[in-house]
Amino acid sequence: MNIRDAIINSMKELNNSTTPKLDIELILCKVLGVDRIYIHINLDKNLTRDEEERFRYFLNQRKEGRPIAYILGNKEFMGLDFFVKEGVLIPRSDTEILVQEVINLSKNIKNPLIIDIGTGSGAISVSLAKFIKCSKVYSLDISDIALEVGKINAKNNGVEDSIVFLKSDLFSAVENLNLQSDIVVSNPPYIRKREIYTLDRDVKDYEPLLALDGGEDGLDFYRRITRESLKFLKKNGILAYEVGYDQADDVKKIMLDNGFDSIKIVKDLSGIQRVVIGFKI
Ligand code: GLN
């Protein structure tokens, strides 16, 4: 079997994927240890029996719904490379809007101190540490796998000295540190419990429920984080969230009820209200 046959023959097997050809090419890249250009200029190259076996193995995983990012072990976010594995949410391009907004807002703050609640793979924290000259980013997560993966990503992207990773139930680990931060940022779990079954198979069967389940109305973490963040934010400090497609107004109300002001809602590239930002009065 050559590369061309591998692509053509497997296309129909991945009819559950929205990007079957890309998935196959990326699996071939992984198996052959090459980049995509190589694939395209070597379509006649034969696979060895061992390569063919490994190709089949990963193709079958993809067929069953395992996300390509977990198969490859990495995902690009904000132009940076992130290691991912089961147990951490795969970084989404939607979240880049949140990061970009925080980068813009931080231009007016000298060496901001940032707290990231529910850091997961570290995508938000690492990008902020990379693109903002911050004094420190506190990356908090209750999941040991997330902290382990986050630390690897901080190191791989050369920002390990700017980030402190702590195992924490929301703010619990910084409770006694007397932190006064400029920015609290979070992409918390926000899917309504009863809607989890409606998610794509690839998401609900493979990604961590802990990072998705936002309770009955999906807003549990916004209520808790907004209330608790007051203690850790300076006056005029910024609270910045990613929210679900229909949650912006509810989250805005939670912020207003807790004494935040000048609430700003930002749409993503699909026109969905994706980011909500408030300022502590
Ligand atoms: N955007 C994710 C999804 O729809 C959910 C992320 C989250 O709950 N924070 O799969």
Image (spheres, rainbow, N blue to C red):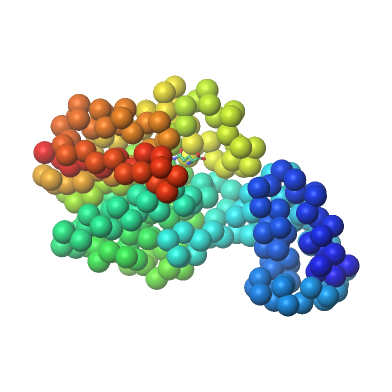
In-image side of 198 versus 260 (left or right): right
In-image side of 50 versus 193 (left or right): right
116 w.r.t. 249: above or below: below
228 w.r.t. 240: above or below: above
30 w.r.t. 71: above or below: below
Q: Position of residue 69 (x, y in %)?
A: 60, 55
Residue at the (40%, 53%) spot, across then down: 96
Residue at the (27%, 64%) spot, across then down: 132
Q: Position of residue 177 (x, y in %)?
A: 21, 48
Task: Please name whichever residue, 15 or 192, is drawn nearer the observer in this view of the structure.
Answer: 15
Task: Please name whichever residue, 125 or 238, is drawn nearer the observer in this view of the structure.
Answer: 238
Residue at the (42%, 28%) spot, across then down: 218
Image quadrant assignment for residue 281: top left
Residue at the (75%, 49%) spot, across then down: 14
In-image side of 40 versus 168 (left or right): right
Q: Position of residue 169 (x, y in %)?
A: 36, 38
